[in-house]
Amino acid sequence: MLLEVRDLHVEFRTREGIARAVNGVGYAVDAGETLAVLGESGSGKSVTAQAVMGILDTPPGRITGGRVLFQGRDLLTLKEEERRRIRGAGMAMIFQDALSALNPVLTVGDQLGEMFVVHRGMSKKDARARAIELMDRVRIPAARQRVRDYPHQFSGGMRQRIMIAMALALQPALIIADEPTTALDVTVQAQVMDLLAELRREYGMGLVLITHDLGVVADVADRIAVMYAGRIVESAPVHDIYKSPAHPYTRGLLDSIPRLDRKGRRLYAIEGLPPSLTHIPPGCPFHPRCPLARDVCRTDDPPLYEVDEQRESACHFWRECLHGRS
Ligand code: SF4
Ligand code: MG
């Protein structure tokens, strides 16, 4: 297994008390596989990724338990220096906001080139040539000229391509992309997502794709892990999820995607808001919003039930959900 997150716990100290941002999250991604981590904002999907990458703001964020195995080694027990080496060459991250992730006072050529100078000991000239190659690779037109431009001189979609180029530079085994297309308009979103999927295939990398948008994952993901209130509530192969979700929250997310074949029908939206992470409800954390909730849901926290070999659901009534009786 390329990456395995086991029973991860992350807390934040806030004025309202301890926020339990990640509560026992586990997921795994193999080489050549795409895992989509899906959830509303505040579900813990980004915090989990930051903990994996070792870029959690500390303090106030604190990992209080769990393991993060990358190619079999637990990153949480490694020395910072070893960890930095893995972070440089083994795994890379793509952020939503390229403008703040890129250095505004360096040309994109210098930023891309720096990766090769620092990590590969290349000359500036060779590094520049590699930078141009990479820009070509992510289909930035006129790369040879544009290599001298600064991040703000590019459109949002082109900047996101530069971020992808930065992430690919050292040919990592794993890329974590946190809402990589959320800031872009819909057409550009699809182009950037297609590019990312294509490069993932070509390089044989593992990809963790973090998104709040179930609509963007259907064509690119192999598996989906759905997060709610800092935990995984359902995890399954993408086709199973689309065919029939085994958790009411996943069902709600699916029903709220606009679909051409359902034109005219009112779009369903899950009622209410996700819980505050300082005051997660007892029992099933989804119960205040769940159309299937019963008494037991208010008191008994559901474990992750094994639905079948490939699927898990944290719902006492996953059978009903799976068979559409909601
Ligand atoms: Fe809904 Fe109960 Fe299932 Fe939670 S355990 S998702 S409240 S039915
Ligand atoms: Mg986020």
Image (spheres, rainbow, N blue to C red):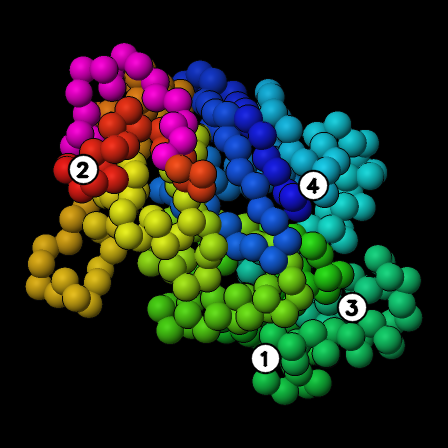
Say if 127 sits above or below 175 in the image: below
Distance between mark 1 and mark 2 Cα atoms: 42 Å
Which residue bears the numbered disc 4?
70
Residue 48 falls in image quadrant: top right
Q: Residue at x 47, y 55 (%)?
A: 222
Q: Residue 271, which numbered label?
A: 2
The answer to the question of whether label 3 and label 4 lie on touching residues, with beta carbons closer than 8 A, is: no
N-terminal-most mark, 4 or 2:
4
Q: Residue 113, which numbered label?
A: 3
The residues colored magenta run: 289-307
Check residue 299 for magenta coloring: yes
N-terminal-most mark, 3 or 4:
4
The amino acid type of the residue labelled 3 equals: Gly
Q: Residue at x 83, y 38 (%)?
A: 81
Distance between mark 1 and mark 3 Cα atoms: 17 Å
N-terminal-most mark, 2 or 3:
3
Question: For the C terminus, which image quadrant?
Answer: top left
Which residue bears the numbered disc 1?
139
Q: x, y (%) of residue 137?
A: 65, 77
N-terminal-most mark, 1 or 2:
1
Is disc 4's CB within 8 Å of ligand 2?
A: no
Along the viewing direction, whichever of 303 and 175 lies nearer the viewer: 303
The answer to the question of whether label 1 and label 2 lie on touching residues, with beta carbons closer than 8 A, is: no
